[in-house]
Amino acid sequence: MPLPKLSLQVLEAFEQVAHSGSVQTAAAEMGLSISTVSHHVVRLEEELGVKLLDRSTRPFALTREGRDALHHLKLGLQHLRQATSETGIAGLLGTRSLKIGFVEDFESNLAPELAVMLAGRMPKAKLSISNVLSHSAPDLLRRGELDLAIASTPISGVQDLSLYPLVRDPFIMVVPRGETGDLLGDQSKLPFLRFNPTHQIGRQVEAHLSRHRITLPERYNFDTVQSIMAVVANGDGWSIITPLGYARGLRFENRVQLRPLPVSPFARRISLIARSDFDAQTSQTIAALVRARIQRVIVDPIVDAHPWMGDAFSMLGDA
């Protein structure tokens, strides 16, 4: 069967509408008119000879054929985006040096692959990859100790840095498997396991609890999500973490379970943060590569296993 003659923009338009359920939202995200996005989706349906969207619902729902098409198109587009990014990096970096910092969430499932790819394309350059804390990343960039950092976006004080949004990482509950109690209401049942309050993630959680006038006894503070997951898996506490953190402790997944927060949702934003004088094209290329990897290795598997997360855990485009 000959392949339909369609532009990549047609495929991307369908992908965006499928994810958002709205032509208007997809058009805004792609910077196109509503009529153009609608035309692209109709064109794809005509080429394939099937209806991909059920337009009788709001938001739009995918038909069975639409779900099948989206599955295959996503895989194809991810490969194309990664190939484009890798080719771009090969031509952009040349012989320059590169210093990248990662938060621990990506230490095992992103940093090694990126290190191998960059090292292979920078045989004459200096390459440094290190772990950083989100709250320390801006100062490391300003001092020139890093060129790029992949970290939680600071709330303020980064006007002198360049931000490339990567992923929206919502806060969720992690509890021992089989636990069904109201842990926010019944505070005596299991202790709450906090992140160290000096860390940015710890401050975000405490601020949200305070907004809801929730006070939990302070007994345990931890620097790493792995430590928190280990204690939860042992049945000795519960916590508020994020899907990216959960992905770091998957060895405990059979002994813990995730729940949505019973209060208003909130999230952190993970971005690639660059020095303002660092090459913008290189930053954009690496950000695109990182997005493709996070989508394929972390976001898709976790959302498939926990459909209630929906679009709360999702990729972000350039601001």
Image (cartoon, rainbow, N blue to C red):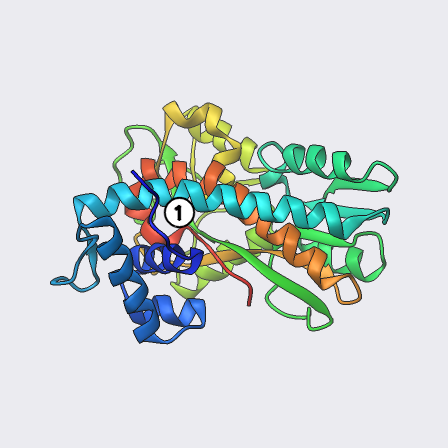
**Which percent across, then down, holds residue 73?**
37, 45
- The quadrant of the rendering that contains the C terminus is bottom right
Residue drawn at 25 percent across, 44 percent down? 67
Circle 1 — which element? strand
Whether residue 316 appears in this view of the structure is: yes
What residue is drawn where x is 42% and y is 57%? 7
- The quadrant of the image that shows the N terminus is top left
Q: Quadrant of residue 215?
A: bottom left
**Viewer-nearest residue: 209 or 125:** 125
Q: Vertical placement of 33 versus 228: above or below?
A: below
- Nearest to the observer: residue 153 or residue 218: 153
- Label 1: how many residues lie within 10 Å, few (<14), some (14-19) or many (20+)? many
Question: Where in the figure is residue 68, as x and y percent of width and height?
Answer: 26, 41
What type is the residue that disc 1 sits on? Ile
Task: Determine if residue 199 is in view.
Answer: no
In the image, residue 47 lies at what x, y percent? Answer: 26, 53
Is residue 20 toward the left or the right of residue 268 in the image? left
Q: Relative to 143, is 290 on the left or the right?
A: left
Name the residue beneath numbered marker 1.
172
Residue lying farthest to the left in this orientation: 56
- Locate residue 110: give its quadrant: top right
Q: Residue at x 51, y 40 (%)?
A: 245
Q: How far across and how far down the image is residue 106, in percent?
A: 60, 39
